[in-house]
Amino acid sequence: ERADRETTEELLPAVSYRHIELDRKKHTLKFSDPRTKIDLGGIAKGYAVDRAVAILQQHGVRNASVSAGGDARLLGDKRGKPWLIGIRHPRDRAKNAAVIPLEDTAISTSGDYERFFIDDDEHRVHHIFNPATGKPAETDSSGDASDSDKLISVSVIGPQGFDTDPLSTSVFVMGKQKGMALIEGLTGFEAIVIDANHRMFFTSGLQQ
């Protein structure tokens, strides 16, 4: 455990978008820190559902639902009615925490329940890491997060998966207060979050 902690602390400075040096004229990209790499895990599925919908549109399809794990893109409606999209209960696979009527939009969900294990101390170790700490997102960069700020599920609704996919991950890491404020400040986006106390919250555009 000590070796793992030391490795994390050693590599943490390499985790930063500031190491990316993009030359738009030459169309080249390099890293100022050779240990830095780009991973598309937090954005690829959202882009994939957008591309799938674009292909369907090119072939004349006007109504469709395309999903890839926690990311979905909806084209039009479902035979004159909205698509009903379930947000899974983060602690009960057999239940939906909410069902949202949507059409012609995208929705992405990030949670601590898809890929995780329980360690020797009975802590849930999941796959969404806080880049400020190098650990699974439970705290913000300023310190401990309370259960009311810690999130276990985040769903973001917006025009396309290319945006909703990274936003749901970002809100999860930021916590309820900062994350919901981020979405409230973006035009055309809404969010549904569930905190560690299993309480659900909606951005203002969804509260009615």
Image (cartoon, helix red, strand yellow):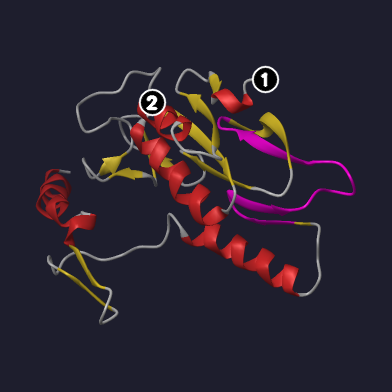
Q: Which residue is mark 2?
A: 150
Residue drawn at (64%, 51%) of the image: 72
Query: In the drawing, does residue 1 fall left or right of residue 113?
Result: left
114 and 66: which one is in front? Answer: 66
Identity of the residue drawn at 43% across and 33% down: 185
Residue 132: quadrant of the picture? top left
Upstream in the sequence, badge 2 or badge 1?
2
User: Which span of residues is magenta-colored?
Assistant: 65-91
Q: Position of residue 172 (x, y in %)?
A: 41, 36
Q: Position of residue 70 (x, y in %)?
A: 58, 48
User: Left or right of 136: which side holds 93?
Assistant: right
- Name the residue at 33% across, 31% down: 138
Inter-mark Cα distance, 2 to 1: 24 Å
Quadrant of the rendered image containing residue 117: top left
What amino acid is found at the position of numbered circle 2 in the picture? Answer: Lys
Q: Is residue 56 above or below residue 186?
A: below
Residue that numbered label 1 is attached to = 208
Q: Is residue 152 left or right of residue 23?
A: right
- Residue at the location (25% across, 82% down)? 26
**Front-most of 9 and 175?**
175
The reply to whether the magenta stretch includes residue 122 is no
Percent of width and height locating residue 112: 46, 38
